[in-house]
Amino acid sequence: INQLKHKIVENLELLLSKISQGVNQNFLNSLRKFLQKIKEQKNFVISDFENKSILKYEIPVNKYYTVPKDVNNLWKRIRRQISKLAEFEVFNTYDSYIEIFNYIEKDFKKLAKTKNVVFLEELNHILKRLISKEILPEIFLRLSVKIYHYLIDEFQDTSRLQWENLFPLIHESISSEGTLFIVGDKKQSIYRFRGGEASLFDDVADFYFKEYNYKKEFLQMNWRSEKEIVEFNNKIFSKENLNKFFNLCEELKQISSLKEDVEKIYSVSQQEYDINKSDGYVYGELIEISEKEDLEERIKPKLLNVVDKLKDNKKDLSKVAILLRTSDEVQMVTEWLIERNIPVESEKTLDIRENKLIKEIISFLKFLICPIDNLSFCAFISGDIFTKATGIPKEEIQQFIFFTNQVSSNEPIYKSFADKYPPIWNRYFLKLFELKDFLSTYDLIIKIYSLFNVLENFYEYYGFFMLLLELANTQEEEDCSIENFIEYFESKNAEVQNFYVKIKKGSSLKVMTIHKAKGLEFDVVILPLIR
């Protein structure tokens, strides 16, 4: 691994010495920044660096400039080396977890067989093996009725396996003057949610029922959205714009069939608007960012400015939604809003079990009752609470964990940590170790808050920390041990509302993933991180 890291640094230096002024300046600056960082950290971990420049398939250039062949080949070699390094790091980090998973899966299947349990995801495969024309009469007999007319809604979420299980029943009915009516949106099936696939729409008509008459109908009228929204979507998904997108995206150029499929799906996507809805507003801004730090520096102030303008215009924040792709992005944007004291509502804000700082405290409690629990110890020392209190950079902690794991030893990681950082260990951990058997969970959490300056460092999450204390206090009526509290905290049977921070209903801006927003409606929708 170290040899590979050394080669990457050497080749990057060589590349930068060969690159001329014809190369895109943003790319050059980003690459120099990346090289500087990995040189500063001798034992760097490649996954610590979010740098989009190293993901570029080809070196971006200015107009009329062509990258020399030797430079292009060197860039490809660097990308292969970085890919190999990432592979090594992933293997070192996660191989043991995969091994554990394989053991668990094996025992899980054995237990399911012993208990005669069948899981929902297996049912379609079992049904596929059972269904045949010969048993159709028995199926109708068990249903006590023969169904002649079928309507399948949300057809884009129907997998081919599910369809093939239904097909014999539907075919039998249509053969007897029955009907099939399917409703769905091909565009939604491109995400393959629940195994859905766009081609199944056409296959139903052109393959499964080609001998029967059928009618395709496309709904062109959009009754929900305002004029500006409809026209904006029409431009975005027009054939011209899709062609432009595929021509700009180097990776997608390699997959010609994908372009054809997407063009076919969106060929009937143009919509008309209701003449009574002639308003609406769309604003977009392209912001080039190269690393995660730039995200906070450049996107955060712009997003907060938009929200402030909505507040100034007396907009009801409960009718405003910020949509993001991932849960991590929801967490990040939620934190931005909370820091500004903007009322916000999301799964990440309401449920304290989803709050990363609370998770860190729970990890610390787990470590205190079981010091050989390396996972919980590492989760705490690599988190915000510990690094903010001690001043040790996260990168340093991550490197310590990575290289301690590489050393073949059965010794718990906390012992290596105590040897490497004795003042930190003595100040922050030793006292809690001595007290953990004499304090209730409630008092122990108060001690953690005090020792690590939790309330001062993360005042915006005061409500979360107080609710955790409240839960610990309530549980003490039954049992004040840490073990009992953690069992309650992680229980699937506990009342969900007990873990929700109370907020004023109807006054909060909504932050959620695009997936969770499906089917909902808002006056204002903000998409701050569309890439």
Image (cartoon, grey):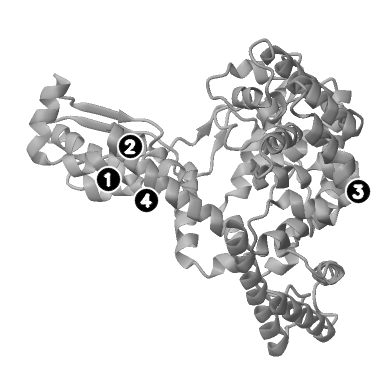
Evaluate whether residue 329 shows in this view. yes
Left or right side of 135 for 305: right
Labelled disc at residue 194: none
Distance CA(mark 2)–CA(mark 1): 40 Å
Evaluate whether residue 346 shows in this view. no
Q: Which residue is mark 1?
A: 205
Residue depicted at x 72% and y 47%: 378
Determine crowd level at label 1: few under 14, some 14-19, many 20+ residues with C-alpha closer than 10 A. some
Most foreground residue, 149 or 27: 27
Q: Is residue 496 above or below residue 175?
A: above
Q: Which residue is mark 2?
A: 112
Residue depicted at x 44% and y 64%: 257
Q: Is residue 163 above or below residue 340?
A: below
**Callout 3 amino acid:** Pro
Q: Nearer the viewer, mark 1 or mark 4?
A: 4
Secondary structure type for disc 2: helix
**Callout 4 amino acid:** Ser
Locate the N terminus by quadrant: bottom right
Question: First in sequence: mark 1 or mark 3?
Answer: 1
Determine crowd level at label 3: few under 14, some 14-19, many 20+ residues with C-alpha closer than 10 A. few
Dividing the picture into quadrants, the one containing residue 13 is bottom right
Left or right side of 109 for 219: right
Q: Nearer the viewer, mark 3 or mark 2?
A: 3
Distance CA(mark 1)–CA(mark 4): 11 Å
Q: Which residue is mark 3?
A: 423
Residue depicted at x 34% and y 47%: 200
Q: Which residue is mark 4?
A: 199
**Callout 2 amino acid:** Ala
Distance CA(mark 3)–CA(mark 2): 50 Å
Distance CA(mark 4)–CA(mark 2): 35 Å
Left or right side of 363 for 114: left
**Callout 1 amino acid:** Ala
